[in-house]
């Protein structure tokens, strides 16, 4: 299949392709616009992506120096840089947002990962970012932590679009869907417009295989590389059940949209497996797959789009039983994955702030030397 048609085929099958990356260089060069023209309909970001973008490029330097001269703190400088990039990306995707009836064309910006255990802090920052970016196709990323779940409900009830991130467990995913529906119900009770709020639930994939495969003994080698897809397919079945029930149907009659599952962490870590297996195996209606460069390029080159999300479902459930019999404690593993994911984002955020601090110092010294 020609590359130009592969992403369109995914769209025809009900799956949106989002791009898991952002940088000012990519926006200003026209590279992001070209990616969108080729069929990508959304964008996700996280602290690690911004850390790489800002720390490895000089394109932000003039803004860092200017903001530093206005006495902004390092974290405020980052926020200003990120907001500007997110606004530009949202504008680039605005036509898609309107053409799809406000169901696609979103850009995601994450709250400070250090707020993951702070419900009130998360709500306050999410409100601030949503207002500052001032784009209807913005989604605020909130992690699916115990403190994040009530924040998600509150934000949805206020009409703020939310990308719920770092979901690994079906149990946690159940609380995410409940928070979304409860938030919609509160919004409806206040007379809000349900059609104007959207949400995705970012269910992480490859990290699940990496963790589980590392726990399997020699006798369980035949189970390697199958757990993440089985877990995601089971989660999709949970999604279908929740959003076919009367409680959601009542909201849908008032214009509510489903909270689409978004497959994240889709780059394949094990070189023994196909580099597009986390895309080809999870295609279905009302889904999103956010891909980093390597996965997006690979899929456009040799992806094979077809409806797969509900295929071999009984085998997937059987597999989840087998890994449990093999001694894998899914609850423990997914809890650790959440903790590790939060630490990775927090570490990236801290590194980013340190790099901005170093840059502002050197830039101001250079400027003083030239004066």
Image (spheres, rainbow, N blue to C red):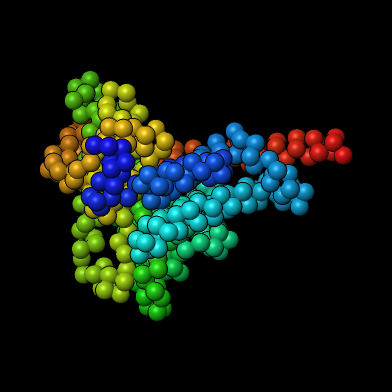
Q: Is residue 109 above or below residue 55?
A: below
Report whether residue 198 is seen.
no
Compare residues 341 and 198 and report the one nearer the observer. Answer: 198
Instruction: Report the label total.
Output: 0
Pick the quarter of the image with the N terminus: top left
Q: Position of residue 181 (x, y in %)?
A: 33, 65
Check the image and name the residue furthest to the right: 371
Q: Position of residue 223 (x, y in %)?
A: 20, 29
The residue positioned 37% from the left and 44% from the top of the image is 38
The residue positioned 31% from the left and 64% from the top of the image is 257
- Residue 196 sits in quarter: bottom left
The residue positioned 31% from the left and 32% from the top of the image is 301
Compare residues 250 and 369 and report the one nearer the observer. Answer: 369
Q: Is residue 175 above or below residue 58?
A: below
Pick the quarter of the image with the C terminus: top right
Q: Position of residue 59 (x, y in %)?
A: 63, 39
Q: Position of residue 42 (x, y in %)?
A: 41, 51
Report whether residue 56 is seen.
yes
The residue positioned 61% from the left and 35% from the top of the image is 57
- 254 with respect to 365 (left or right): left
């Amino acid at each position: 299949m020609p590359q130009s048609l592969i992403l369109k085929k995914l769209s025809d099958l009900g799956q949106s392709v989002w791009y898991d990356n952002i940088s000012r260089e990519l926006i200003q060069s026209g590279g992001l616009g070209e990616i969108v023209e080729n069929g990508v309909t959304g964008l996700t970001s996280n602290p690690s992506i911004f850390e790489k973008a800002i720390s490895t490029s000089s394109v932000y330097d003039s803004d860092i120096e200017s903001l530093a001269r206005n006495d902004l703190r390092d974290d405020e400088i980052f926020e200003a840089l990120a907001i500007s990039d997110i606004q530009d990306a949202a504008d680039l995707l605005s036509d898609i947002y309107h053409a799809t009836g406000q169901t696609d064309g979103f850009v995601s910006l994450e709250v400070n990962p250090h707020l993951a255990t702070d419900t009130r802090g998360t709500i306050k920052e999410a409100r601030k970012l949503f207002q500052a970016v001032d784009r209807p196709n913005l989604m605020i990323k909130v992690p699916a932590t115990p403190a994040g779940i009530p924040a998600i409900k509150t934000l949805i009830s206020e009409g703020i679009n939310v990308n719920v991130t770092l979901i690994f467990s079906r149990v946690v995913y159940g609380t995410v869907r409940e928070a979304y529906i409860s938030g919609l119900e509160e919004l409806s009770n206040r007379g809000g417009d349900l059609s104007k709020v959207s949400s995705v639930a970012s269910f992480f994939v490859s990290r699940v295989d990496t963790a589980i495969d590392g726990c399997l003994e020699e006798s369980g080698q035949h189970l390697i590389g199958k757990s993440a897809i089985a877990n995601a397919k089971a989660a999709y079945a949970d999604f279908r059940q929740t959003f076919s029930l009367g409680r959601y149907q009542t909201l849908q009659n008032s214009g509510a949209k489903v909270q689409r599952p978004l497959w994240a962490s889709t780059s394949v870590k094990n070189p023994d497996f196909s580099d597009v297996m986390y895309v080809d195996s999870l295609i279905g209606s009302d889904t999103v797959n956010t891909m980093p460069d390597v996965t997006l390029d690979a899929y456009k080159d040799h992806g094979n789009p077809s409806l797969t999300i509900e295929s071999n479902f009984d085998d997937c459930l059987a597999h989840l039983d087998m890994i449990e019999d093999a001694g894998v404690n899914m609850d423990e593993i997914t809890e650790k994955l959440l903790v590790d994911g939060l630490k990775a984002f927090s570490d990236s955020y801290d590194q980013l702030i340190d790099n901005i601090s170093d840059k502002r110092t050197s830039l101001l010294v250079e400027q003083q030397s030239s004066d």
